[in-house]
Amino acid sequence: MQVTETAAAGLKREYRVVVPATDLEARVNERLDDLKGRVQLRGFRPGKVPVAHLKRIYGKSTMAEVIDAAVREANEKIVNEHGFKLATEPRVVLPTEQGAVEGVIAGKSDLAYTVEIEIVPPITLTDFKTIKLERLTAAVTEGEIDEAVQTLADQSRPYHAKGEGAEKDDRVTISYQGTIGGQPFEGGAADDVPILLGSGRFLPGFEDNLLGAKTGEERAFDITFPDGYPAKELAGQQARFAVTVKAVEAPGTITPDDEFAKTLGMESLGKLREALRERIQREHSAASRRRVKRALLDQLDERHKFEPPPTLVDQEFNSVWSAIENDLKQQGRTFADEGTTEEKERADYRAIAERRVRLGLVIAEIGERNKIMVTEEQVRAAMVEQARQLPGREQQVWDYYRKNPGAVAALRAPLFEDKVVDFVLELAEIADKSVSREELLKEDEE
């Protein structure tokens, strides 16, 4: 086998591989000789079938197997001898001349082909002990617990019928029929729909047109769908809604006390407050973790500047860009509507793709060097968590992961990333800083 480098540019390499026909023939004969002792053919005793006869029957298929094995062996030789890490699978380019491949399979020609590979550049990892980070923390205040208790009380408050016109915070139950140009449209009609006035959950202006309405009243008004409405055929269209008010109800009040807590399955108001404190603290801890992780990834990106493999960047960019274009298409909007240009957005998202690929390679390198692994138990625990989020469909979730190795890999990847992040955070110098809840959650809200 002869391997010759024919091109090298950046992270891409090209090699010409030649396997003599005599070598292929020897491998074929070796395989057929092994097959002779196992195959049974009519007219021949076991183990007595001539190799020449086997070659007439199985020669082409055996040669195809030998060629496939020779290609894999050559590719492995190239990677191992040079200590390469592959960014993508090698691309094998066979000769295109008429009859060239047939000649190799017939044993008349050498196997000569080109293999193109793209490699991961050597990565020199930073000294993680020199990384300095600030970890934001926020204590849970009594005011936050008071607010959480009141929110639960508001969500549980009863409503009672009222004879006066509807006001903000009242619940109005309506039936409606919408038309555009006098014609009904899909999704434009519904019966017995409860609307909390002031919640802003309906089309802009819809709830305002129900203020002052009384039970049994009929109203008609025009509403213009927003330009960015998800159903693009309705975006920007003016619709006429005929509304019948079925009921108008005013909110009652609930006193947050022990009896209220018991309706939520708690022994007392004190126990409810303890549970809310723990929930809010978990929210704070998760937000703190997200902030320090983002800061760490920023430093890892800044400290590891190298050319990422172009093919991986292209794949990442194309995936993101496709989602951007589909989103704009569904909304019926353009880059100009967003106050930008396609050229600028392409440049921005390519930079994002490069960062993602580079960080992914750095994280993989840290994990490999430090033998960081995701166990099967951890993967199964993640599957269980996914199944819990779909009550009654647990078996479907399990079947999905059992049949889709790619989905399991997608589940494993963030687990691996978090383990690597934890490893680096253990070595980094971290200073805790106490801030308010608003400051802690500011980036999430943005």
Image: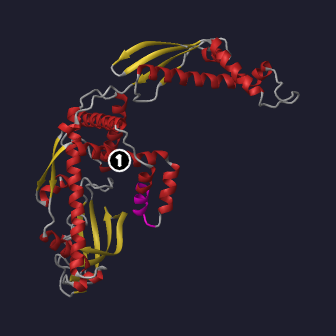
Q: Does the magenta-highlighted stretch encompass residue 386?
A: yes
In magenta, the rendered stretch is: 382-391
Q: Does the magenta-highlighted stretch encompass residue 161?
A: no
Q: Is residue 92 above or below residue 293?
A: above
Rendered-image quadrant of the N terminus? top right
SS type, badge 1: helix
The residue most toward the right is 43
Residue 302: where, in percent of width, then height?
20, 34
Residue at numbered disc 1: 414
Q: Is residue 354 above or below residue 212?
A: above
**Which residue appears at 16% of the width and 44% of the height?**
133
Closer to us: 446 or 268: 268
Amino acid type of the residue that numbered disc 1 sits on in the rendered structure:
Pro
Can residue 66 be seen in the rendering of this structure?
yes
Residue 9: where, in percent of width, then height?
35, 17
Q: Is residue 265 above or below residue 446?
A: below
Closer to us: 133 or 20: 133
Q: Does residue 151 appear to the left or right of 377 in the view shown?
A: left
Residue 136: where, in percent of width, then height?
15, 53
**Which residue appears at 19% of the width and 44% of the height?**
295
Q: Main secondary structure of the magenta part?
A: helix
**Which residue appears at 21% of the width and 87% of the height?**
162
Q: Is residue 179 above or below residue 130?
A: below
